[in-house]
């Protein structure tokens, strides 16, 4: 064997350098972003200067949510393209992509166009800042990003569940799954009791906006059940990256419930405001988790196609 042939053989078996994957990049950016936010929060607590957290949440925080929301929509569109038009999962990812587009719209409305900052174009277009208009726009954004987004996502996940049921790969849940569901369901029931008490004591007419808001917690419970069932099925099948995809959706949905619980406990004085402030950072992790789900799905599809070619 000549020297040049030995070199070719050695280079073929040499280990390839691992590059940072797309999910890994999302995780690292989120960790750095949250770390900066925690540092800003500590600076505020130590100095009493509100500008530390104002600058972080009104500028960096708003940009993070809008950019990551756009990344989520872009990745869901790419994940959808990995399936042919006649495949059942194509329809499911079409609904998931639509849900991501709605969520992105809600994030821009609630966290960018309603914040008085120099990165908001509305500051330059309007002669004076209309606080009432900003509050109404934020309310609309929360409605779009909440129940409307959840209804579309629930419809997409239901198609995946229907397919897995037909393929007979659905399996039972484990103790940790029941614990997560119990926590979210208990909070949903407590919120339902409060809503019933308020409505029974009030003589005002019930609006469509109020009804949609009331659907938020029940929809979160439904989404969590769907995501947990799907993830448990793919874990049982040994689909690593696919299980991470549905695990990311599970984390996003569960952490949304935890953030809602924190806001509720803070509003009613059950926890100190410093503890409630920690839930502000959960929304960044939720946004990252929603973007991670299609990122893992896309990575799994690309890897499967590469393996088929070799």
Image (spheres, rainbow, N blue to C red):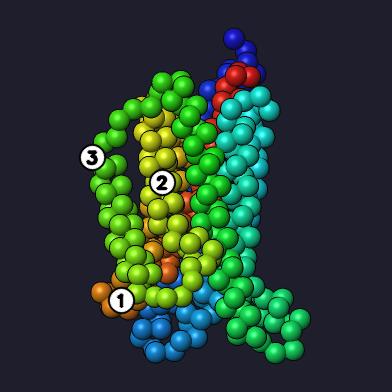
Helix, strand or loop for disc 1: loop
* Residue corresponding to mark 3: 175
N-terminal-most mark, 2 or 1: 2
Please, is residue 5 above or below residue 196 in the view? above
Please, is residue 43 above or below residue 264 in the view? below
The location of residue 114, given as percent across then percent down, is 61, 75
Figure quadrant of residue 233:
top left
Taking the spot 65% from the left edge, 86% from the top edge, the residue there is 130
* Residue corresponding to mark 2: 222
Mark 3–mark 1 Cα distance, whole angstroms, equals: 31 Å
Outermost residue toward the front? 203
Rate crowding at label 2 as few (under 14), some (14 to 19) or many (20 or more) other CA atoms within 10 Å: some
Taking the spot 42% from the left edge, 41% from the top edge, the residue there is 227
Taking the spot 60% from the left edge, 19% from the top edge, the residue there is 308
The location of residue 52, given as percent across then percent down, is 48, 82
* Residue corresponding to mark 1: 268
Helix, strand or loop for disc 3: helix
Check whether the beta carbons of the residues at disc 3 and disc 1 lie within 8 A of each other. Answer: no
Q: In the rendered image, which quarter contains the C terminus? A: top right
């Amino acid at each position: 064997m000549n020297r040049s042939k030995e070199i070719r053989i050695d280079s073929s078996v040499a280990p390839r350098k691992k590059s940072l994957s797309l999910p890994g990049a999302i995780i690292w950016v989120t960790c750095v972003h949250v770390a900066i936010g925690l540092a800003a929060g500590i600076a505020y607590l130590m100095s009493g200067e509100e500008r530390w957290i104002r600058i972080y949440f009104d500028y960096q925080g708003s940009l993070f949510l809008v950019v990551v929301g756009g990344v989520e929509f872009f990745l869901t569109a790419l994940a959808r393209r990995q399936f042919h038009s006649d495949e059942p999962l194509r329809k499911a990812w079409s609904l998931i992509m639509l849900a991501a587009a709605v969520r992105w719209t809600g994030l821009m409305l609630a966290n960018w166009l309603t914040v008085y900052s120099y990165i908001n174009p509305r500051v330059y277009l309007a002669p004076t800042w209309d606080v009432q208009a900003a509050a109404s726009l934020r309310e609309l954004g929360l409605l779009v990003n909440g129940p409307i987004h959840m209804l579309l996502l629930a419809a997409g996940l239901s198609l995946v569940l229907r397919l897995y049921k037909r393929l007979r790969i659905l399996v039972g849940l484990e103790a940790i799954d029941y614990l997560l569901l119990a926590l979210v369901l208990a909070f949903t029931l407590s919120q339902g009791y409060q809503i019933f008490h308020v409505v029974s004591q009030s003589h005002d007419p019930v609006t469509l906006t109020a009804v949609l808001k009331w659907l938020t917690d029940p929809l979160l419970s439904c989404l969590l059940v769907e995501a947990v069932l799907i993830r448990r099925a793919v874990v049982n099948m040994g689909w690593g990256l696919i299980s991470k995809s549905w695990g990311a959706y599970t984390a996003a949905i569960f952490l949304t419930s935890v953030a809602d619980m924190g806001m509720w406990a803070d509003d009613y004085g059950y926890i100190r405001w410093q503890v409630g402030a920690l839930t502000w950072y959960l929304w960044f992790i939720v946004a990252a988790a929603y973007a991670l789900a299609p990122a893992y799905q896309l990575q799994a599809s690309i890897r499967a196609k590469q393996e088929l070619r070799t």
